[in-house]
Image (tube, grey):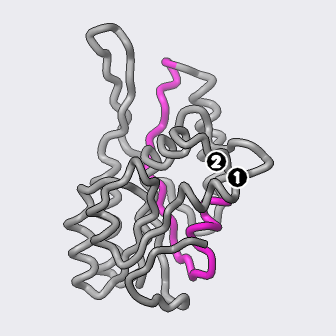
Amino acid sequence: MEIEEKDNRNLENRVMIFIDGSNLYNSLKKYWIKVRFQEIIEVLGKGKNIVKIFYYTARLDIAFNKEKYLKHEKFLGKLKEIPNFNIVLCNLRKIVNRDGIIEFMIKGDDVYLANDVIKSAYENSYDVAIIVSGDEDFLPIIRTVRALGKKVTNAYFPKTSSYLLRKACDSSINLKNELKNKESKYGRTIPDNY
């Protein structure tokens, strides 16, 4: 596994994984990576003591597309089968553009993720946090939890990630490289719309 590290990590440490679901979905789609979700967890958790995984997403609008809604619900059901996996449901905002095109945005996911990283650090629930996101907005929380003695790893995709975010962390994992090498023979299990 290609891991860029600034210092050595003790693999006996308690690890919590915080996944920005929208960022992960859009990055996988951008790079045409088709893997089972369990394979993503295996890449992130290889040789680590994972105590909890958080996945931030929103329920889809059943009235807009019932088929996608049902696929997404099935996907969330499969995620719930993963040990120590927690789905954090955020708000889905419907936006109608001037040209009439409807878009959806997940709102509040970054705030929930940031809150869980900081709260769990103060509760001493982990030694290492793995943040799956490319969002530079997480820089302040990374500084805060590192000041508490916690290690932080950024799991990222190159063109959807902030260089400053990666540099603020103790280590990083290039998910594009790791998952491209592990592309599943089973095909995509991440639904067409997260």
SS of the residue under disc 1: loop
140 left or right of 47 in image = left
Q: Residue placed at 25% from the left, 85% from the top?
A: 148
Residue that numbered label 1 is attached to: 183
Q: Amino acid at mark 2?
A: Gly
Q: Are marks 2 and 1 in contact (CB under 8 Å)?
A: no
Q: Position of residue 38 (x, y in %)?
A: 67, 59
Determine crowd level at label 2: few under 14, some 14-19, many 20+ residues with C-alpha closer than 10 A: few
Q: Nearer the viewer, mark 2 or mark 1?
A: 1
Q: Residue placed at 62% from the left, 57% from the top?
A: 179
Q: Amino acid at mark 1?
A: Glu
Question: Please, is residue 2 above or below residue 32 in the view?
Answer: below
SS of the residue under disc 2: helix
Question: Please, is residue 36 above or below residue 190 in the view?
Answer: below
160 left or right of 44 in image = left
Magenta includes 53?
yes
Q: Position of residue 169 (x, y in %)?
A: 33, 73
Pick whichever, 20 or 27, lies toward us. Answer: 27
Residue that numbered label 2 is attached to: 77
Quadrant for the N terminus, please.
bottom right
Question: Please, is residue 126 above or below residue 88 in the view?
Answer: below
Which range is magenta? 39-64
